[in-house]
Image (cartoon, rainbow, N blue to C red):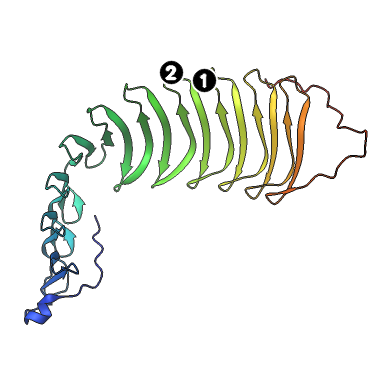
Amino acid sequence: MLLLIAAPISRAAADGKDQDHLKEEFYPGGERKRKIPYDESGRISGTVTRWYPDGTTKAVLPFIQGKAHGEHRRFYPDGSLKSKIPYIRGTQSGTGYLYYPDGRKKAKLPAEPDPRIEYYRDGTTKKTTAQRNGIPHGAEREYYRDGTLMAARRYHQGTQTGTEEQFYPSGTLMKEIPYQNGIRHGTMSVYYPDGTLKRETEYCRGQPCGLTRTYFRSGTPAAEIPYESGKRHGTVRKFRRDGTLKSAQTYREGILIPAAAPPAGENLSPQEPLGHKK
């Protein structure tokens, strides 16, 4: 765990104390904010203590020679325990825990190779995440409160990759979302609760591209929306349930181009009904 410390304003200097070995930070009102001990080499060594403005302890973080060493504990403003994680010379050495303000477990953070586990307030499992070197690596599973799978995704060295699947509480597939190097890339599919296709959207490096298609529950096309670089670009067509054309609007780089009024007495001719999506 890294502790980022900005260059502090030290009261130790004003008091004539050795500011190379102990630095203290204060809130604008003069209340203690943080105490940081250093060794002769300038490395954090000893217990870093942080406080809330009212004086309640916010964190107790032991270090040795610049590395986390001992049990790191953090607290809520009311003093209740927020987290505790054990370390030995910068490496997590056992199971850590996160807590809700009422004291119930929020997450279990085991040392590798066991997965990280997050909990709902009632104690049921909310999410499990495989890890390596303290970051997500491998399968992650997210659950509804009743234990039904909500989502399944994969990570590689902390970056989401592959196809994420999301599910309805009934267990049927809701979405398929492709990822590449942490961003959406490929065809995302969205389904109705009965499993029929609702929408297909092509993504290129995180932005919609190509033609997005939406469907009625019957499988009949509902709309065709062209994208370029994340913006509507081209003719957006919407259809009636019988497959005939309902409207057509032209966009250029996300901006709607007003349609010219047709000559008097002329109307748009409806298209032939389109086929159903298999």
Residue 189 position within the rendered picture, expressed as x and y whole percent measured from the top left = 57, 31
Residue 115 appears anywhere in the view? no
Could you tell whether 107 is left or right of 65 in the image? right
Residue 123 position within the rendered picture, expressed as x and y whole percent measured from the top left = 22, 28
Dot 2 amino acid type: Ser
Question: Which sits in the foreground, 124 or 160?
Answer: 124
Could you tell whether 268 is left or right of 156 in the image? right
SS type, badge 1: loop
Q: Residue at x 23, y 27 (%)?
A: 122
In this rendering, is residue 37 above or below 176?
A: below
In this rendering, is residue 144 above or below 108?
A: above
Question: Which sits in the foreground, 161 or 17?
Answer: 17
Q: Residue at x 26, y 63 (%)?
A: 4
Q: Residue at x 37, y 42 (%)?
A: 137
Quarter occupied by residue 185: top right
Dot 1 amino acid type: Pro
Count of numbered labels shown in the rendering: 2
Q: If the image is split into quadrants, where does the C terminus sit? A: top right
Q: If the image is split into quadrants, where does the N terminus sit? A: bottom left
Q: Residue at x 67, y 32 (%)?
A: 213
Residue at the spot of label 1: 193
- Between the residue at mark 1 and the residue at mark 2, the CA separation in whole angstroms equals 8 Å
Q: Could you say which disc has been placed on residue 54 in the image?
A: none
In this rendering, is residue 52 above or below 274?
A: below
| Cβ–Cβ under 8 Å for marks 1 and 2 | yes
SS type, badge 2: loop
Residue at the spot of label 2: 170
In this rendering, is residue 99 above or below 9?
A: above
How packed mark 2 is, by other alpha carbons closer than 10 Å (few <14, some 14-19, many 20 or more), is: few
Residue 33 position within the rendered picture, expressed as x and y whole percent measured from the top left = 16, 64
